[in-house]
Image (cartoon, rainbow, N blue to C red):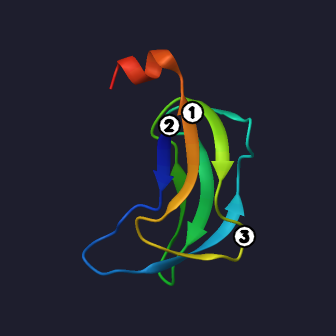
Amino acid sequence: MKEVRVPKFGMSAVDVEILEVLVQPGDRVEVGTPVIEAGSDKVDFEIESEVAGIIVEVLVEPGQTCAMGAIVARVDQDDSAAMTE
């Protein structure tokens, strides 16, 4: 199981707002598939899956505030993807 996290930008700890959840549990994702759309006071961005697999859990909802590094979803990796890491 791979965790999808809010990326860390720079040295300062900045909270981000979840703008939109782009996947639901059961959805298939590939490497680079946008999972969450989020924003800070400076920029809006997409949080992407780092692995191929199936979304098993989404831990956030629109309007929620999260810290950098927070877990926003979990992906059950494909066996073939896990072997290439």
- Identify the element where label 1 is drawn: strand
Q: Quadrant of residue 53?
A: top right
Q: Amino acid at mark 3?
A: Pro
Mark 2, other Cα within 10 Å: few <14 / some 14–19 / many ≥20 = some
Q: Which mark is residue 76?
A: 1
Mark 1, other Cα within 10 Å: few <14 / some 14–19 / many ≥20 = some
Of the numbered discs 3 and 2, the one sitting upstream in the chain is: 2
Q: Is residue 16 above or below residue 79?
A: below
Q: CA distance from mark 3 to mark 1?
A: 23 Å
Of the numbered discs 2 and 1, the one sitting upstream in the chain is: 2
At x 71%, y 47%, the residue is: 23
Nearest the viewer among 23 and 82 is 82
Q: Amino acid at mark 1?
A: Asp
Q: Which residue in the structure is indicated by mark 2? A: 1
Nearest the viewer among 79 and 7 is 79
Nearest the viewer among 35 and 45 is 35
Q: Is residue 70 above or below residue 74?
A: below
Residue at the farthest front position: 1
At x 35%, y 80%, the residue is: 13
At x 29%, y 81%, the residue is: 12
Mark 3, other Cα within 10 Å: few <14 / some 14–19 / many ≥20 = few
Q: Which mark is residue 26?
A: none
Which quarter of the figure is the C terminus placed in? Answer: top left
Residue 64 x %, y %: 66, 76
- Identify the element where label 2 is drawn: loop
Q: CA distance from mark 2 to mark 1?
A: 5 Å
- Identify the element where label 3 is drawn: loop
Q: Which residue in the structure is indicated by mark 3? A: 62
Instruction: Check whether the beta carbons of the residues at disc 2 and disc 1 lie within 8 A of each other.
Output: yes
Q: Is residue 44 left or right of residue 13?
A: right
